[in-house]
Amino acid sequence: MKALLFSLTATAILLSPLFSKEKMVDPAKFPELKKMNAVLQDPVLTIKGAIEKPESYILKLEARSPQGSQNITAFLNKKTSELYIGSAYDKEGKMIDFPKDAKIVKEGVAFTYGTGKKEIYLITDPECPYCSRFEQDANGKLDDYTVHVILFPLSFHKKSPAMTEWIMMGKDDVEKKARFKEVMLKGSKKYKKLIKDEQKPFVYSSEAQAYIKKSGEAARELNMRGTPALYDAEFNPLSQDQVLESAKK
């Protein structure tokens, strides 16, 4: 069942009316929804939210695996109890997705810089070469933006936790940004003083560990699939080209 959940091909279905009038389901009803389909009773799945439509429920599910957790959207037919997992579109061709929780995303922000009218959220890994390349390309070009940075160390980047800890040691947003730029643009190694034993996993301070939990939840809420990842103020995905081209204009 676990393998099935993560290998399902995205299923496109049409739902109406449009996804504008949202009727949130009381969490007390979630156990009743789980009983409607055997897949929902798999212990790896947790219903995190539900929206009621005339003929279906739109579900926000958390799926857990040894590699971590991810949020997925599912559609539960009221009449047949059939469950569709994947992508769905309204009759105008607009993707239907569960609304993002702004509180979860904003709590994952490590620091913010800039005073531009356009807001963007950036999920980045200090050790990621693609993230560093983006910072090089975007350096000095984001004056029109207010940038909210979410630090997300990928598990296979062994130096990233120490880099993140060092950046988060900045006393305020200005100092955190300065440290971030030192690492990303200048290749600073100052974080190394925090590494006590390179042969062992890095141990975060309690403050940084609490932040890492929040950044992980924010990345999951935004359905991040890799770094760097960019989103607009409404949490819609943006490409690097979109941001950089807009910056040029």
Image: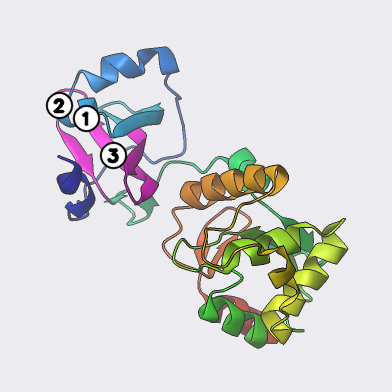
**Residue at x-position 32% and y-position 47%:** 66
Closest to the observer: 199 or 74?
199
Disc 3 vs disc 2: which is toward the camera?
2
Q: Do the residues labelled 2 and 1 touch (CB within 8 Å)?
A: yes
Q: How far apart are marks 2 and 1 (CA)?
A: 7 Å
Q: Distance between the residues labelled 3 and 2?
A: 14 Å
Magenta includes 234?
Answer: no
Most prominent secondary structure in the magenta stretch? strand
Q: In this view, does 188 lie above or below 164?
A: below
Q: Where is residue 18 in the image (x, y as percent from the top left)?
A: 38, 41
Can I make out residue 162 in this image?
yes
Disc 1 element: loop
Magenta includes 73?
Answer: yes
**Residue at x-position 64% and y-position 87%:** 137
Disc 3 element: strand
Disc 3 vs disc 1: which is toward the camera?
1
Q: Position of residue 127 (x, y in %)?
A: 57, 73
Residue occupied by mark 3 = 74
Q: Tell me, for residue 38, which label it has, or none.
A: 2
Closest to the observer: 104 or 233?
104
- Give the class, few, some or many, for how many residues have Cα within 10 Å of label 3's Cα (few <14, many ≥20): many
Amino acid beneath label 2:
Ala
Magenta highlight range: 58-86
